[in-house]
Image: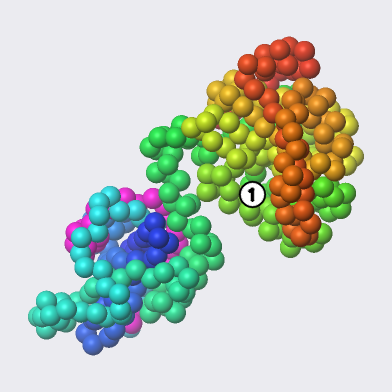
């Protein structure tokens, strides 16, 4: 006999995880909020119902997080196998039920319910710094808690993304959710995914790529950290990274991204760009920049696109000037590199008013297309 349980993961704006402290037939249990699936009920409907019944709290299910992938016997009925499904949720109204500060802090009313039914519960938030698999009791919950904790303290932002996008109050619309592909007859820019890790790592092994960057990349572990940060930034609505595919060479050639994006101020930065040394000076960079600038000004309607580089990176400065970027100035002691050294940064920019002329001169004959 299968016993299907549906649970919700709720992390509030203070990065605290909601848990339920329960006393069930003499057993003290701390678990995620939720309960059993009823006959004829969908899993999401079940979770919405459970939050209403337990907390009088309307919630929206924002994503699937985990489903049991191992055998688990029921603690209360040895003949039953437990299958648990976990979703992320967000509240649609303020929480009105009492929120406790200590474990199993039952009041007289809750203890009276226990006397009548053999079950009672109360609710509590656990700070992210204190949350771990030891914060919950049930074996499957422990697995989920460990997975949740591995997401890092920015976990909640991943599930705020749908809210920010759907509200559109800052102009983001569905930008970060779109699979934006830009291409012409020389290059294709693809949204960065895990599948790009290995081909890009083969390029990233070239030490010269990182000479003037703030990142210190010398091992695969270093690059994994850098790569994960790029993926996380898109999830967290901070940047949009792309893998660069050289159509002519029929292979991946590097990486770039939109960063420091501000829809209210209609601006973004093009940066974090690096290419296979064998493809530098072949026109790949110019084609990439044309696609990114065209999309920023003509599709997103931005007023400004900025670029920056180390004051020591003369090669990069020449490349920016060769495509019509306007040199704005030097920000002294602007950054601390991963190596601990200080960096002066030179800023360049394009603005919307200048783009038509640059497009018809420096980029004359270039033809972009995109699929999004």
> Is residue 59 one of those drawn in magenta?
yes
What's the residue at 29%, 58% (across, down)? Answer: 47
Q: Which residue is mark 1?
A: 230
| The C terminus, quarter of image | top right
> Is residue 17 one of those drawn in magenta?
no
Provide residue 268's location: percent of width, then percent of height. Answer: 61, 34
Outermost front residue: 332
Q: 287 or 47: nearer the eye?
A: 287
Judged left or right of residue 300, residue 132 is left
What's the residue at 44%, 79% (across, down)? Answer: 134
Q: Can the viewer see residue 82?
A: yes
Outermost bottom residue: 26
Where is 53 relative to 58, above or below?
A: below
Judged left or right of residue 290, residue 250 is right
- Give the extent of the magenta segment: 50-76
Provide residue 163's location: percent of width, then percent of height. Answer: 39, 44
For label 1, the SS is helix
Where is 6 relative to 157, above or below?
A: below
Where is 261 relative to 108, above or below?
A: above
Q: 352 or 255: nearer the eye?
A: 352
**Quadrant in which residue 283 is drawn:** top right
Judged left or right of residue 81, residue 204 is right
**Quadrant in which residue 301 is drawn:** top right
What's the residue at 43%, 49% (across, down)? Answer: 160
At label 1, counting other C-alpha atoms closer than 10 Å, the crowd grade (few under 14, some 14-19, many 20 or more) is many
What's the residue at 39%, 76% (across, down)? Answer: 136
Provide residue 207's location: percent of width, then percent of height. Answer: 86, 53
| The N terminus, quarter of image | bottom left
Q: 234 or 137: nearer the eye?
A: 234
Q: Can the viewer see residue 144?
A: no
Task: Give the color scheme: rainbow, by chain, secondary structure or one colour.
Answer: rainbow
């Amino acid at each position: 006999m299968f016993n299907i349980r549906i649970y919700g993961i709720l992390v509030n704006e203070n990065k605290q995880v909601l848990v339920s402290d329960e006393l069930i037939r003499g057993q003290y249990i701390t678990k995620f909020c939720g309960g059993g699936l009823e006959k004829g009920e969908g899993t999401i409907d079940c979770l919405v119902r459970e939050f209403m019944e337990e907390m009088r709290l309307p919630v929206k299910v924002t994503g699937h997080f985990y489903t049991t992938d191992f055998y688990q016997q029921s603690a209360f009925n040895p003949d039953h196998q437990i299958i648990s499904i976990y979703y992320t949720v967000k509240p649609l109204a303020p929480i009105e039920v009492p929120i406790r500060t200590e474990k199993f802090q039952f009041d007289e009313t809750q203890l009276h319910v226990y006397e009548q039914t053999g079950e009672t519960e109360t609710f509590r938030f656990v700070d992210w710094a204190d949350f771990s698999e030891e914060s919950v009791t049930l074996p499957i919950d422990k697995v989920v808690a460990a997975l949740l904790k591995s997401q890092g303290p920015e976990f909640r932002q991943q599930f705020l993304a749908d809210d920010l996008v759907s509200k559109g109050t800052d102009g983001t619309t569905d930008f970060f959710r779109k699979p934006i592909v830009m291409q012409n007859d020389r290059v294709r820019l693809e949204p960065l995914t895990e599948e790009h890790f290995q081909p890009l790592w083969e390029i990233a092994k070239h030490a010269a790529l990182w000479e003037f960057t703030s990142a210190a990349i010398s091992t695969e572990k270093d690059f994994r950290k850098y790569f994960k940060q790029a993926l996380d930034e898109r999830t967290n609505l901070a940047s949009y990274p792309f893998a660069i595919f050289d159509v002519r060479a029929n292979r991946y050639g590097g990486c770039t991204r939109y960063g420091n994006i501000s829809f209210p101020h209609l601006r973004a930065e093009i940066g974090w760009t690096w290419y296979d040394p064998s493809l530098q000076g072949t026109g790949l960079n110019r084609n990439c920049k044309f696609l990114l600038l065209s999309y920023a000004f003509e599709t997103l309607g931005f007023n400004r696109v900025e670029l920056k580089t180390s004051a020591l990176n003369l090669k990069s400065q020449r490349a920016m000037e060769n495509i019509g970027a306007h040199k704005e100035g030097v920000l002294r002691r602007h950054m601390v590199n991963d190596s601990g050294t200080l960096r002066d940064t030179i800023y360049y920019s394009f603005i919307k008013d200048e783009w038509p002329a640059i497009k018809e001169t420096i980029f004359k004959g270039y033809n972009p297309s995109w699929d999004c």
